[in-house]
Image (cartoon, rainbow, N blue to C red):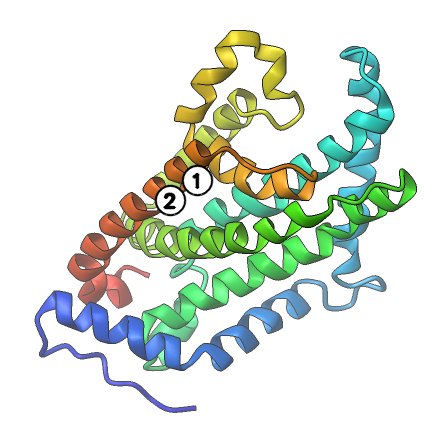
Amino acid sequence: MTATPLHTALPPARAASHDLLAGLRLWRLATALGWLDIRLQFQGARLGPLWLTVTSGVMAGSMGLIYSQLFHLVLRDYLPYLSISLILWQSGLALLVQESCTTFTQAASSIRSVRLPYTVQVIRTLTRCTLTLAHAMVVPIVVFAIFRLWPGWPLLLALPAFGLWLATGAGLCLLLGCTCARYRDITPIVGSVLQLVFYVTPVIWEARQLGHLGGWLVYNPCYAMLEILRTPLLGHTPRPALWLVAGGSSLAIWALALGVFARCRAQLAFWV
């Protein structure tokens, strides 16, 4: 492991860029730390991380049976949609936002004891979230296998969509990680806002159920981010407008994140 200087003598913007590059060079260490976090979380459990799969499977199965009856939907059409939507929201988008808030506070002991670029903690958080999502994705795969569904070539579009997810997630880790390290009240506020966004985003219901009002959903960045990954997995091609909204949101988050990180980086070790 190579100790990295903190670049305290450099201007804030330049020190932040050095931190980003140094953190990327230490990606192997960062991913190993993320994997270790998952192992420690389930240390002593017989199923280990498979508990994530079991929990997600029980939730998707029970909700699919209940809501298909409530919405008068065919289970074979609704359960694949619901299983993917729930997993991408709960184990993907919502988890990523919540973990972004604790990117630096959760690694407080490491930050105080080892001189490493803060970007290492960002990659560590992304690794943790990706592993959690990978375990949960077993559920929709099993559902698709049961109903003998195959998304076909649109599945390839999920790769750039997932790359955009990771890039946006890195920006969120910098932005929310710095902000929540300074103002601890923001973390529960973010949790409350996520609950509200869950109900106004098509996760357990479908956009077509809104009729002509469904067109307004394109202005929901969470919907755009969710849809560009969910649609290819369901065998369809996302609308170009959704890519524009998701890409624009990612750029806006990164612009804010770079400004906040450059301004707050020198104080982060004291805040955590």
Residue 28 point in image, percent of width and height: 50, 81
- SS at badge 1: helix
221 relative position to 80: left or right: left
For label 2, the residue is: 247
Q: Which of the two residues, 28 or 228, is positioned nearer the viewer here?
A: 228
Q: Which mark is residue 268?
A: none
Q: Are marks 2 and 1 in contact (CB under 8 Å)?
A: yes
Q: Quadrant of the N terminus?
A: bottom left
Quickly name the residue at label 1. Answer: 243
Q: Residue drawn at (86%, 28%), measured in percent from left and top?
A: 76
Residue located at (18% from left, 67% from top)? 266
Is residue 63 in sight in this rendering? Answer: no
Left or right side of 131 for 261? left
Query: What's the residue type where badge 1 is placed?
Result: Trp
Q: Amino acid at mark 2?
A: Gly
Disc 2 crowd, CA 10 A, few/some/many (<14, 14-19, 20+):
many
Q: CA distance from mark 2 to mark 1?
A: 6 Å
